[in-house]
Image: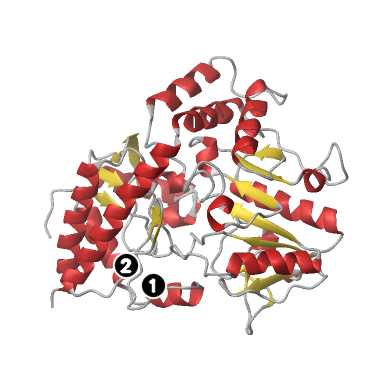
Amino acid sequence: MSTDRTRQRSAALFDRALGVIPGGVNSPVRAFAAVGGDPFFVERGEGAYLVDVDGNRYVDYVQSWGASILGHAHPAVVEAVQQAAVKGTTFGAPTEDEVRLAGEIEAAVPGCELLRLVSSGTEALMTAVRVARGFTGRDRILIFSGCYHGHSDALLAAGGSGVATLGLPASAGVPAGAVADTVVAPYNVVPQIDDRIACVLVEPAAANMGLVAPAEGFLAGLREACDAAGALLCFDEVITGFRLRRGSAAELVGVRPDLWCFGKVVGGGLPLAAVGGRRDVMEVLAPLGPVYQAGTLSGNPLATAAGLAVLAELSDQDYEELAGRVARLAAGLAGAFADAGLAAEVPRLRSLLSVFFSSAPVRDYEGARAAADTGVYPRFFNAMLERGIALAPSPYEVAFPSLAHGEEEIERTIEAATAAAREIAAP
């Protein structure tokens, strides 16, 4: 397909970036390495759209990796941040909005009795691990292959052979000792949990290998196994928290963890995350208990203002409407692939969806990797980008439609996918 989309300014900026930033980007997935080509540079966001520095306009399904559930530059969020900024951007001292935001989260998440605000999902998960170890007096943690819990050393572990094994470093620079107490198991299989495990970390719906829903009985089985072994269960809801419903996915799956980690939506698009849980567990944190954690920018006034503004805008009806739009989008994409004769799965969980170019449903990381290995996703990504639709530049990510994505954007996306699928399937 021939288009008039030029990216000359983006190309020039990327060349400059390569000289001052490793790989030209400040987070690896932005480099487009998984889909080919060079990234476009954003000038501004407008609701469901991004506009790049060359003036190209895209329907955006990344939405800052799910942080912008209202869409880009929502007036209520912009106004809240502006009003907060004129009072000061950081204090290193308590503010009322920290208390208000923690209270909003606590009220929406039964069982989450105390919260600590931090600046990133990685920080939240690091803190959850330290809290669990401090509370239980144990060292081992268990994670699942294909789930991403931030880039701290202990959580950058890859599985070895076998059903559940001690982890191996998944990144250069991570010493073997850092993951020596990290056990990695396949997602959707309840592993053996013994009295050496401090906590089990799990995404209640896996959203970092594409979207993989929990199998029937998986989360309930984890809860039962943790209880039997005296281990804590932690839900990593950096993505799913306040994205699928107002509060936690725990209410959808019927399983309550001991600890939660939230991010993205609760920060309103600014750097903010939270770790929370049972009162007795969270009370091990300093200054109450012996587990140390600190952050100069924790509870930053701009971020708490943005988070409060977003939560004030979201109603139960909004979540239902968004889920309905995403259901229509998922059905349209599935129809486009079927009409073109492309083997594809389009899993959806309320307002999340992804695309696997696979002939069978994906249940775990092995299935997600097999779908990625077909090599179809990069072609689809680029065909969609040329038609003005910006998807995640990786086959292992999900799409994040926002409340700003109306019927016009949904229909435009389905039309683009129909044409892109035919182009890919053509001999």
Residue 238 location (% of width, % of height): 56, 49
Q: Residue at x 41, y 78 (%)?
A: 370
Establish if 421 lies above or below 130.
below
Depth check: give the residue in front, 31 or 305.
305
Q: Is residue 336 left or right of residue 197?
A: left
Q: Residue furthest top?
A: 87
Residue 417 location (% of width, % of height): 21, 59
Q: Is residue 362 left or right of residue 283?
A: left
Q: Residue furthest bottom?
A: 162
Q: CA distance from mark 1 to mark 2?
A: 7 Å
Q: Is residue 397 left or right of residue 252?
A: left
Q: Is disc 1 placed on a helix, strand or loop?
A: helix
Q: Amino acid at mark 1?
A: Ala
Quarter of the image for residue 145 reads bottom right
Q: Residue at x 23, y 38 (%)?
A: 55
Q: Which label belongs to residue 223?
A: none
Depth check: give the residue in front, 365 or 104.
104
Which numbered disc flags the more N-terminal residue, 1 or 2? Answer: 1
Scheme by which the image is coloured: secondary structure
Asked if marks 1 and 2 touch (Cβ < 8 Å), the reply is: yes
Q: Amino acid at mark 2?
A: Tyr
Tell me the quarter of the image containing the N terminus: bottom left
Q: Residue at x 55, y 26 (%)?
A: 305
Residue position for label 1: 372
Residue position for label 2: 377
Depth check: give the residue in front, 100 or 256.
256
Residue 174 appearing in the image:
no
Residue 252 location (% of width, % of height): 53, 53
Residue 409 appearing in the image:
yes
